[in-house]
Image: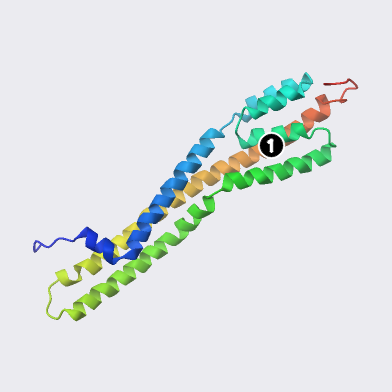
Amino acid sequence: MGGYSIDVMQVLRSSWIIVLMLVLSVVVITIAIERFIYFQKTKLDSDAFMEKIKGFIVDGSYKEAIDYAKTFKGNVAAVVRFGLENRQFPREENDKLMEAKRMEERLNLDRYLDILGTLGNTCPFIGLLGTVMGIIKAFKDLASSAGGGPEVVMVGIAEALIATAAGLAVAIPSVIMFNLFMKRVKIISVEMDAVSKKLLVLLANYGEGASGRKRG
């Protein structure tokens, strides 16, 4: 192979796109870890949770129900707690209030995911830009070194190939993480809608004054 080797540091110094890809890879890893921890902390068995809330409502123990909901950090629990705290409003008004709360919680769920989606779509093109620039560099080096061997263009070619690989290496995990997290967002959004409807029905049938009895 002529005994010629590529100086990796030389390639990195000559290509700002490869350095950019390294920085973006750190961004992707950081966001993925942050979102994974967030979704793990907010994980909740909504069916078991609502059964417990139902028991509190039937007993008229609203303070206990709110305190129980506060023990969970999840978005679902936050919506239920908000609905319980505003139970004095008519059903239609409480429904609108919980809808607003769900919208706020959806913002928390979507946080940083737009960055993953954007990087997943744009990094291959950034890598392609690096590829084109590397090829241009290779031909420029070849033109400026008349009679030079293949080693003259190897840095430029290496830069082009590394840029392509780097773009894909950042984009592929970004797309995978984005899709996985978006699936989780959709599941939690459905759960928030479901518990809102369940809570309204429970308050209507077992809430204060529902059966003519005074509930605390």
* Location of the C terminus (image quadrant): top right
Dot 1 amino acid type: Val
Does the rendering let one see residue 54?
no
The colour scheme of the drawn protein is rainbow
| Residue beneath the point at 12% across and 73% down | 149
| Residue beneath the point at 63% across and 30% down | 46
Q: Is residue 146 above or below residue 3?
A: below
Tally the marks: 1
Disc 1, SS: helix
Give the farthest residue toward the left. Answer: 2
Q: Is residue 191 shown left or right of residue 116?
A: right
Which residue is labeled 1 in the image? 79
What percent of the width, then of the height, locates residue 22?
35, 55
Q: Residues within 10 Å of mark 1 (few under 14, many from 20)?
A: many
Q: Quadrant of residue 74?
A: top right
Does the rendering let one see residue 71?
yes
What percent of the width, then of the height, locates residue 32?
46, 45
Give the farthest residue toward the top. Answer: 59
Q: Quadrant of residue 201?
A: top right
What percent of the width, then of the height, locates residue 42?
57, 34
Q: Quadrant of residue 5?
A: bottom left
* Location of the N terminus (image quadrant): bottom left
What percent of the width, then of the height, locates residue 91?
83, 37
Q: Is residue 9 above or below residue 105?
A: below
| Residue beneath the point at 24% across and 67% down | 157
Q: Is residue 173 shown left or right of residue 81?
A: left
